[in-house]
Amino acid sequence: MARLINALEQLLDDNGDPLASGLLDFYESGGSTVRKTTYADSAETILNANPLEINGDGTVPNVFGTGTYRVVVRTAEGAQLRQRDPIGGDTSLSFGSDWLSTTVYGLADVVKEDGQYWESQTAANAGNQPSLDGGTNWLLFLADVATNTTNIDTNTTNIATNTANIATNTADIATNTANIALKGVKLQASIATTSGTSIDFTGIPAGVTRVLFKFQNLSEDSSSAFLLQIGDSGGVETSAYNSSSGATNNTAGLLLTDLQNAGASFRGIYMLERLSPLSNIWVCSGNTQRSASGVSECAGAKELSGELTTLRLTTVSGTAVFDGGSASISWEF
């Protein structure tokens, strides 16, 4: 029992791609249409199917047989690509075997020579060296397998790289989408200023360049002026401010007004703006109107050690209790 086809020989389609799941029909030699049995083992105990399906990568399973055969190579759909007759016996011509100058090759026989695979274009093709033939008797069937294998490895690497790039780009898109969502003016809900000696406004994200503090009907139970303090991740700071309202100065916070008396209510807007993109110096100004009479102008500055995170509304005395109104903040990037 002889092996009819080299084990794991890879067959290709007309485009030079592996003939995945293609078919091999085995017939009696000499143009016969009578099917002839092949075996998966040399002891002839395991019958092969006929037609025999080629592996998914185009390689050929074990094929053993006695005598000569006519073999037809087909696509998975059954379309004939080529045939070879005879194969087997003493004159066996295996797929892609090395070219020999003394062998007579038939039409569509495939041989390997000079690192490449060639298909015979004529019958009784003998003594014509494929690499020197000039395309008369031989047609290049498949270029150097080693080169193609290298190219496949390279393409596989490129696919992996491109996949990683796609993942990176997807992450960038998600980041940009998140950044876009952060842009614009963000307004917090109002907080009632009806109790306590201080009220904190938190949730200010990193990268903010402007914060507005807005208040309506703000009042407290004594005559201590309203004060705005700011802080970063280290907490609200209570010193090193440079703040004025009218003729009154303060270093414990940013003054909102220099006029205050119990029972009066105040409304206005105080703006805090980052001095420069990489700076944590905040410059501030605003206008406050008192219910009884009068308008106060205020301005100041304060440098933090980190990103602004918190505004605290309190009073100069720190003991006055809020008893009316509401306030809110908004920010911009």
Image (cartoon, rainbow, N blue to C red):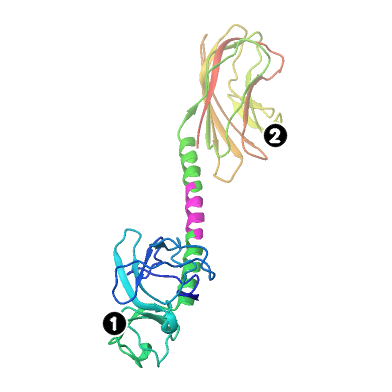
- Of residues 144 and 91, the one nearer the viewer is 91
Toward the top, the furthest residue is 263
Q: Badge 1, how many Cα within 10 Å: few under 14, some, many 20+?
A: some
In the displayed structure, does residue 200 sit left or right of residue 133?
right
Q: Which residue is mark 2?
A: 240
The secondary structure that dominates the magenta segment is helix
**Mark number for residue 57?**
none
Q: Quadrant of residue 223?
A: top right
- Of residues 15 and 80, the one nearer the viewer is 80
Give me the residue at 51% from left, 55% from top: 164
Q: CA distance from mark 2 to mark 1?
A: 95 Å
Residue type at tag 1:
Gln
Residue 230, relative to residue 65: is it above or below?
Answer: above
Give me the residue at 66% from left, 9% from top: 222
Q: Badge 2, how many Cα within 10 Å: few under 14, some, many 20+?
A: some
Is disc 1 placed on a helix, strand or loop? loop
The magenta region covers 160-170
Residue type at tag 2:
Ala
Q: Position of residue 185 (x, y in %)?
A: 46, 31
In the displayed structure, does residue 319 sit left or right of residue 5?
right
Task: Say whether residue 162 is magenta.
Answer: yes
Q: Which residue is mark 1?
A: 121
- Of residues 332 and 127, the one nearer the viewer is 127
- Of residues 37 and 251, the one nearer the viewer is 37
Is disc 2 placed on a helix, strand or loop? loop
Task: Say whether residue 142 is magenta.
Answer: no
Q: Are marks 2 and 1 in contact (CB under 8 Å)?
A: no
Q: Quadrant of residue 143?
A: bottom left
Residue 35, relative to residue 122: is it above or below?
Answer: above
